[in-house]
Image: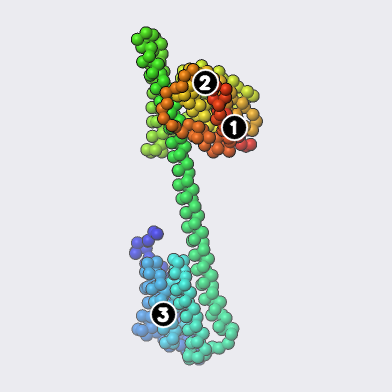
Amino acid sequence: MHVKPRWAELPLPLLVGVFQGVVTRGVQWWQVHDPGILRIPLDPLGWVLLLAGPLVLIVRRRRPVLSLAVAAGSTVIFIGLGYSYGPVFLSPIIAFHTAVVTGHRRVAWSIWGLAYVFFVVYTSWFAPVRTTGWFHDLAVAALMGLAVVAAEFSRARRERQAEHARVEQEELRRRASEERLTMAQELHDVLAHNISLIHVQASTALHLIDDHPEQARTALTTIKQASKDVLTEMRSVLNVLRDGAPRSPTAGLDRLDELIERSGLPVTKKIVGEAGPLPPGVDRAGYRIVQEALTNVTRHAPGASVTIVLDYAPRALTVQVTDSGGDAPGESLGSGNGVPGMRERASALGGTLTATHHGRGFRVEALLPIPEESR
């Protein structure tokens, strides 16, 4: 909790002390001489009691219970000794408000209740001019009740503000976690695709370099471009992690032809429906799902032909990637997160993804809903 410097606590106690001293000095003359009240004039002890309340308000935020106890106690003694009624009640009201707002409700209410009992008993049996009757007691209760209502309202308002701030912080943390997860998923997809491509093309180059150097040159060119792409993507993500710099435009389906060309696979692309602009999330997910599917073909079925179908419907985009199956199993690069990662992308958009065997090959099909307001 933020604590103000001590000098910042001085203005209010100073103003309250001046107000209580000046006004009490002004009203005591008629209270001393009015036979219906019969209060006594201020003396040194009276001044000490009158200013004790404002003085202790300096520590009201650091010691709210002590501040309330001293302010209420000095006020009770001040009234009990017969000094004038007046703004002496201001100090305990402020101290009570601070104690309630800072969470010391039970102690504050107890002190407030004892103070009420004192005023009722004092004015009924011990005051020079006694005041009895339910109307007087109710009036005192109403005045003290106003202080209670104001304090409780402030406390509830502060708690709502604190809860609102806490919820906002939780939301910021949640969004940051989701962003980190998204960046990790993006980085995984980029690395998985490009490293797999580099691995396959490097194996091809090693196999052809002696007998077919020109074909090996093509494989090495593909490796060069793939390594450049992965470095660019990694630099973009790392810039975000380092200083929040804006990312370069995320890959989307408009770059699908470039992805197909780099894959080194015989790919046929089909478009069903009218291709149009897509929401960024759907566009990015469609691209990454195709990328991951091509990565899996490169890993597990090198040389297989691939058919990519993009079906643009008014309310959804369907992405289908089917491979014919390789003549020989590909070289495994370890158990990855390919299919689960694709399924998570689809689920995050409210869609579905299936990955099943299709003849000798494999088919990945994702249904990605398009929000109504995006069309």
- Judge depth for marks 3 and 1 and give the one in front: 1
Q: Secondary structure at mark 1?
A: strand
Q: Is residue 298 visible?
A: no
Label located before the other in sequence (3 or 1): 3
Residue at horizontal 49 percent and vertical 61 percent from the top: 159
Front in this rendered view, residue 57 or 372 = 372
Front-most of residues 212 and 367: 212
Q: Residues within 10 Å of mark 1 (few under 14, many from 20)?
A: many
**Residue at screen point 38% across, 80% down:** 49
Q: Nearer the viewer, mark 2 or mark 3?
A: 2
Query: As displayed, is residue 359 above or below residue 91?
Result: above
Q: Which corner quadrant of the image does residue 365 belong to?
A: top right
In front here: 53 or 30? 53
Quarter assignment of residue 91: bottom left
Q: Measure the alpha-carbon separation of dots 3 and 1.
A: 73 Å
* Mark toward the start of the polypeptide (2 vs 3): 3
Q: Are marks 2 and 3 in contact (CB under 8 Å)?
A: no
Please tell me the numbered disc located at residue 73: 3
The picture places residue 60, in percent across and down from the top left corner, at 39, 69
- Disc 2 is placed on an element classified as loop
- Dot 3: element: helix
| Residue 136 in sight | yes
The reply to whether discs 3 and 1 touch (Cβ–Cβ < 8 Å) is: no
- Spatial CA span between label 2 and label 3: 90 Å
Name the residue tied to disc 2. Answer: 325
Q: CA distance from mark 1 to mark 2?
A: 23 Å
Q: Amino acid at mark 1?
A: Leu
In the picture provided, is 270 more to the left or to the right than 96? right
**Residue situated in front as seen by the camera: 14 or 254:** 254
Residue identifier under label 1: 367
